[in-house]
Amino acid sequence: MAATMRDVARLAGVSIKTVSNVVNGYRHVTAATRARVLTAIDELGYQVNVSARNLRTGRTGVIALAVPELSVPYFAELADAVIAAAAVHGLTVLIELHGADRAREIEAVGGARRRTTDGLIFSPVALGAGDEALVETELPMVLLGERVFHDGVDHVTMQNVEAARAATEHLLDRGRRRIAAIGVHPGEEVGSAGLRLVGYRQALAAAGIPTDDALLGVADPWHRAAGARAMAALLDAGALPDAVFGFNDALALGAMHELQVRGLRVPQDVAVIGFDDIDEGVYANPSLSTVDPGREQIARTAVQLLVDQLDGTRRAARRVFADYRVVARGSTAPSTT
């Protein structure tokens, strides 16, 4: 027979009400009690009666995640992390791709699909400063990224400038001085490309190295092929970098491929670092150094903030900057030759 909530309560040594609180994601359950209940749920294979819960609460039990695309590995892995975080709260995630199209992003916030979901985690790209009114909605929502900031909306984002500066400093610490930046969007100030370029410039300036525009590689979209093309363009123009900072891992992997095709050794001739800490980078040859921007933390925090809105426990909108760390691997190993 299927396990019941009563069975879970008995195994965990708690009340049925406590099990219900854990299943529904209420915050006032202690971490230790929540862990016992979740362990009991796993052991018994207990399945939440979603239909009954939804009828009782008036919810669908479905939240949406709207991102630009899944062909960029970061967003695919972010989606996996959001799905896992939502499952802890008994929620299903609907993935929507807006393709960085302005009309589709506006539709993601206020379109008909929002009537069938309880809330939205939204990563806009086409929307930007001045579009704050477009994200004003009664729908529970959490913003991701740095395109739109609104004091009335929960927001989770990266420390783009600081993390990019740390990535560049990592290369400087390896003795590299002619560091190319791949992924530049000319004229962009708000957005990942603009902010990561700021961090790159800050690190060089602090080391007394002027920015060399000949080492700035324009690339859009941030795919592997674009990274390879940008790297090829710099080399063909006579740039001679001794290191490359790819503004995401896909760009860095594309750049590293182009370097190796041309007979340049990584890291002996050119060190390479990326940004995002995607799984693929671990298995590159050499393995790719990168910045972990806190993707798992971003997913867990965004889901929790959305759940707080659904439960009515949110008191004021929050802005959370995820922690980051530099992950050193083979592509920036100290040169011995």
Image (cartoon, grey):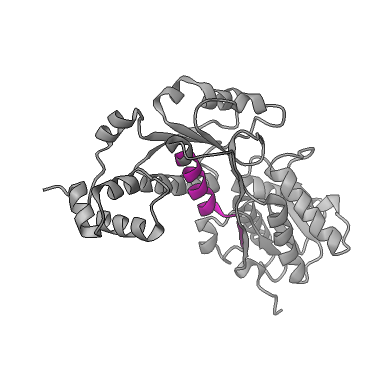
What is the quadrant of residue 89 in the picture?
top left
What is the quadrant of residue 206 in the picture?
bottom right
Can residue 270 be seen in the rendering of this structure? no
Name of the residue lying farthest toward the top: 112
Q: Position of residue 186 (x, y in %)?
A: 78, 39
Tell me the magenta residue range.
290-307
Name of the residue lying farthest toward the left: 1
Q: Position of residue 114 (x, y in %)?
A: 45, 25
Left or right for 282, reference 1:
right
* Vertical placement of residue 205 versus 73, above or below: below
Is 298 colored magenta in this rendering? yes
* Vertical placement of residue 277 versus 192, above or below: below
* Vertical placement of residue 63 versus 216, above or below: above
Is 76 colored magenta in this rendering? no
Front residue of 100 and 152: 152
| Secondary structure mostly seen in the magenta stretch | helix
Left or right for 320, reference 180:
left
Front residue of 142 and 279: 142
Q: Position of residue 83 (x, y in %)?
A: 41, 45
Q: Position of residue 79 (x, y in %)?
A: 47, 44
